[in-house]
Amino acid sequence: MSVSNLIITEFTEIHPPDSADLLASMSPWYGIRTRSNQEKVVAAGLEGKGYKPYVPLYVLHRHRADVLVKSEHPLFPGYIFCRFDAKKRLPVLMTSGVVSVVGCGREPVAIPDQEIEAVRAVLRSGLPAEVCPYLPEGQRIRVMNGSLEGVEGILVKRKNQSRVVVSVTMLQRSLSVEIDDDRLIAI
């Protein structure tokens, strides 16, 4: 069973930024790509250098041989977040386990504070959530299950609801249907 099909039952954070740190820090958030399974190591290394890394984690509960096993995993495997000055990123890049700073080419691109706060809000809410693939609007997708299984189209969003647009190109006509994101896969 893949992680994407499991329901996340609990969230924790490694080194969550507190509100005083957020107000005091004027540096933007950046995504840091890490080596495989090195998220916690990178976070500890950055913290040792005086940075405030943020690693959102979730806890999976699985039954194995009549025993409930809890395991902690990064919400975004291979990535952590950190506030720093992009012009002074060499100490970050020299941290053990760091592969790169997420950006466009060699230029780091900041992550909006609202997106980090949205992740933190989900973690704090305690509501059931699932890991799911990122499907940007305009992505060609295929419906994986249900009565529309196998249907391909374009993903559009309308009032925070996902819709699949199916088109007849020769007629230059389309129709759209609302669908849950967990039924979709990018093609």
Image: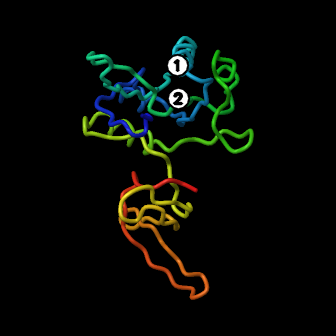
Quadrant position of the N terminus in the picture: top left
Asked which quadrant contains residue 38, the reply is top right
Q: Say which residue label 1 marks.
A: 43
Q: Residue furthest right?
A: 106
Question: In this image, 140 relative to 3: left or right?
Answer: right
Residue 80 percent location from the top left of the image: 52, 29
Name the residue that disc number 2 marks: 80
Name above or below for residue 181 compared with residue 166: above
**Can the viewer see residue 158 in this picture?**
yes
Could you tell me the amino acid type at mark 1? Ala
Task: Measuring from the top left, give residue 168's x and y in whole percent.
Answer: 55, 81
Q: Is residue 109 left or right of residue 179?
A: right
Q: Quick check: 11 above or below 41?
A: below
CA gap between label 1 and label 2 equals: 8 Å
Vertical order, 113 against 40 (above or below)? below
Q: Who's the residue at 50% across and 18% down the image? A: 40
Q: Quadrant of the C terminus?
A: bottom right
Q: Are marks 1 and 2 in contact (CB under 8 Å)?
A: yes
The answer to which of 34 and 181 lies nearer the viewer is 181
Mark 2 residue type? Ile
Nearer the observer, 76 or 53 = 76
